[in-house]
Image (cartoon, coloured by chain):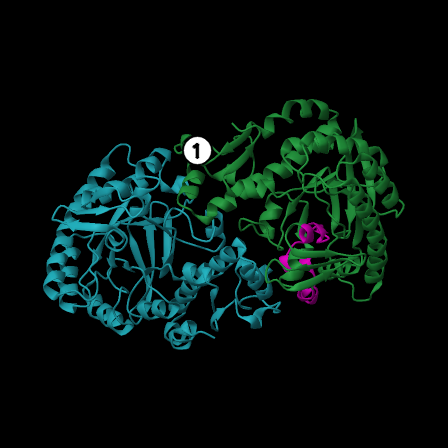
Chain colours: A green, B cyan
Amino acid sequence: MTGKFTLLGREGKARRGRFHTAHGSVETPVFMNVGTNAAIKGALSADDLRDIDCQVELSNTYHLHLRPGDELIRDIGGLHRFMNWDRPILTDSGGFQVFSLASLRKISEEGVQFNSHIDGRRIFMGPEESMRIQSNLGSDIAMAFDECVKIPSPYEYVRESCLRTARWLSRCKAALTEFNSAPDAVNPGQMLWGINQGTIFHDLRIEHMQRIAELDLPGYAIGGLAVGETTQEMYDTIEALEPYMPGDRPRYLMGVGTPGNIIECTARGVDFFDCVMPARNGRHGHLFTWDGIINIKNEKYSRSDEPIDPVCGCPVCRNYSKAYLRHLFKAEEMLAMRFSVMHNLWFYNHLLQRIRTAIDDGSFEAFRRRYSTLLDTRI
Amino acid sequence: MTGKFTLLGREGKARRGRFHTAHGSVETPVFMNVGTNAAIKGALSADDLRDIDCQVELSNTYHLHLRPGDELIRDIGGLHRFMNWDRPILTDSGGFQVFSLASLRKISEEGVQFNSHIDGRRIFMGPEESMRIQSNLGSDIAMAFDECVKIPSPYEYVRESCLRTARWLSRCKAALTEFNSAPDAVNPGQMLWGINQGTIFHDLRIEHMQRIAELDLPGYAIGGLAVGETTQEMYDTIEALEPYMPGDRPRYLMGVGTPGNIIECTARGVDFFDCVMPARNGRHGHLFTWDGIINIKNEKYSRSDEPIDPVCGCPVCRNYSKAYLRHLFKAEEMLAMRFSVMHNLWFYNHLLQRIRTAIDDGSFEAFRRRYSTLLDTRI
């Protein structure tokens, strides 16, 4: 069953599905909760993730390779055991971080030479290295090693980069197949997903998608968006690309986005999402509610014994007032971070749950009209 | 029943008791978990406190008066509701913080003028003010407003200060009686405990104790120790004082101490303890175990898939390895703090549980011989 994607229903281009991994199945559309260093920002533990109904945890290959080292994690039994999380894990390939965090990058056909952002150490990563690291981590979904091209970039550069990323993908597939067949593979059910690139050049996106679809992978991601283009350009690119994405495979829009973005991209046929926004905004006191975004540090909440959101069922809203949470921020208590991140991640996980229910019920378009703008509004 | 202390047993001077409050009973000897700002350091929530078997939470009058303000907490229903903790709460009087944190103090018979350490605001606090604040907070045990005299101080100054602290105690008692009888009292079952002072002058300690014992309060604390004297001087002072403390009332040694200190002071007749040490040490990676204190940041733990302490049943030891916790510290993840504080507070709460069981079993002296030095040793 691992790798199987079942389409349970659709409304317009919005899809309701179920995806099977070696650590259980995932109901889609789904939001994946980001734990870069095998830990969620804001002092959330794996137990907290279960409490907020997280389906998939996402960790970062680049970060874990640098620290504590993927071989150490392999020796301890893999990422699931290391962080005490027994549900699905997706690892990115490290490509995005190599191109956003590391310095003195040198790209060749083989891969990328770069300096660690932690200690400046010279490191080489190519398709085989990324796959070996992800194999050591033992995630359920390993992402392809790709070049994440910045926007804007010259057409000719993007075209060449896409061709190289496609060649890298073939090497990723060969490498992971080999690692999975090793007798001591941490997670022999680990699968590879391809990543589409091409910035906002629709023809390059489509051409690249057609090329990587030939590899018949169990899932495909749209990478390199939400990195500088306008929201409309992002939506237009997804709309142009979507007909060329295999209809029977899950589609993952990497690093996106606001609640409104997620609703709009679900409407454009996307199934998997991830974003640091709920955690990052939470740490600054910006909290999502079904009426819009509030800033809990606002003076007007100082005496409110109401929860953050009266319709929210998260562990924070069930037990604590806005006045208490605001106090924790003012007193610079770490608990402020934890409660805010917990609430925001719950909000995202349950936003996706409501999206799934709406597609099941055939009410997704009504849901979209009601919430697509509202949820991104600061109130 | 509120205020009643039942002596269940003893071994030597060590006492096994049960103390009744408006929010349930407390098994003694007990360690109270410090939540200065109505929150435990390290992002622990009230739910976490329940998970680590905390019996009594301790909050700080001085801090909460300054921020968010005790009237705000009263309006929300009191500290129990504010922080979602339905078991006993003890609040200190603010005296210790006024004498350790605030600046430009001016002491008079009425009380103390000082500058807030947060915004420099000029504030006056005397016995009545401290009682009004604690009444607004609605804790179960309110501590007397006292002067915490530094060690060393001149004999004559300490004597005068003790006399004034005794006069302040009478005013505390009158004030709290009045506040408790108000129809809108947050916690009409709130009780006052006296605080003994006198630095390490045994005669002043005893004289002061005799004076405040006359007020017939439901509990008495030993204040002003562990502020600069040697450990032996502290033990000697407690030994000299103990025969003069009412035998049928609980005794609380404020701000003490290491596991060894707690065992030794239990052996000298103390029932209540509190200390920031488990939380503070935890935040620096110093973790208590039944074999001594380890530094989790040590390189030798980088590949250990063992828990912090194999005999510990805390939520961290049950689920996570030393390698993971060390990684969290190295990656500067907030979760490192939370796990360390959680483990150390569990250790303290269960140290006291084992002390209680040992007194019940008549094996406390054996327990003391085995652990009194061992637990404070860095390994």
**Point 52% across, 65% down: residue:** B312
- Quick check: is A285 in the magenta stretch? no
In the displayed structure, A130 sits above or below A162; it is below
Tell me the subunit letter for badge 1.
Answer: A
Residue B372 seen by the camera = yes
The outermost residue toward the right is: A214
- Quick check: is A78 in the magenta stretch? yes
In the rendered image, residue A186, in percent from the top left (x then y), is placed at 75, 62
Residue range of the region highlighted in magenta in the rendering: A71-99
Left or right? Give the position of B245 relative to B327: left
Residue A342 seen by the camera = no
In the rendered image, residue B215, in percent from the top left (x then y), is placed at 16, 52
In the displayed structure, A209 sits above or below A269; it is below
Label 1 residue SS: loop
Residue B319 or B126: which is nearer the viewer?
A: B126
Other-residue count near label 1 (Cα within 10 Å), few / some / many at <14 / 14–19 / ≥20: few
